[in-house]
Image (spheres, rainbow, N blue to C red):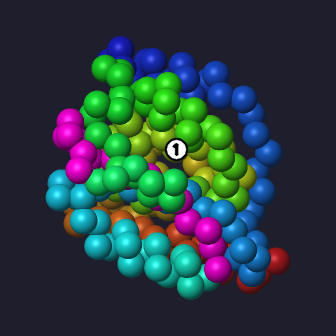
Amino acid sequence: MSLKQRIFERALRKQASRETRFPHLDRPLKVMLLYESDVLERNDAIKTIRQDLLRRQMDVTMWGFVEKKEIVSLVLPQSRILGLADFNMFGKPRDYELADLKAEHFDLLLDLTTRPLRPLKYLALYTNADFKVGLNLGEGIHDMLISPPNFNAEQGKEAGLEATWLYDQIMRYITTIRSMD
């Protein structure tokens, strides 16, 4: 196990336990959307997902990550893309990013990460949310996991898994579970 992984697992163990609350989709929710940005920072699929959440009367904050040093997108209160310069050598967000992340409380974290990227794992870990859902990448952060058949977490996008598919699965399960109780 690498030093970076050991440090991440230590941070995971140090997290205070929290009370999980399943989201009620019939009420307005404050949602954090995490995703891997495309290199050009256009993210058309993520913008479509955001529009769908806005149609559902949800307040959406989006944080993306791209593996490059210089980011050209503006940092806005509701949307930002982080790059390598926003994280330390272990993949942990810098203090100023952590302060912004921890300052907000969300009803729901939708983690649309499709491959194990340590910076996005840290963002999911430190997001203050009542309910966290994402792909089963084996890190133990989320309250609900989506596990596609024959999925290898190391492949992610190379396996053809896309954020829109993951979003559709998450919303299908959350809606189904909600309608049954």
Position in image of residue 169 (x %, y %):
48, 73
Q: Is residue 7 above or below residue 94?
A: above
Magenta segment: 57-72
Report the front residue among 149 and 105: 105
**Quarter of the figure with the C terminus:** bottom right
Asked whether residue 176 is in view, the answer is yes
At 39% from the left and 78% from the top, the residue drawn is 48
- Horizontally, residue 30 falls left or right of residue 18, namely left
Position in image of residue 145 (x %, y %):
54, 56
Report the front residue among 88 and 132: 88
What's the amino acid at mark 1?
Answer: Ala
Q: Quadrant of residue 165?
A: bottom left
- Give the number of callouts: 1
Queried whether the magenta region covers residue 66, the answer comes back as yes
Queried whether the magenta region covers residue 116, the answer comes back as no
SS for dot 1: helix
In the rendered image, which residue does mark 1 sit on? 124
Q: Quadrant of residue 18?
A: top right
Asked whether residue 152 is in view, the answer is no
Position in image of residue 74 (x %, y %):
34, 53
Position in image of residue 36 (x %, y %):
32, 53
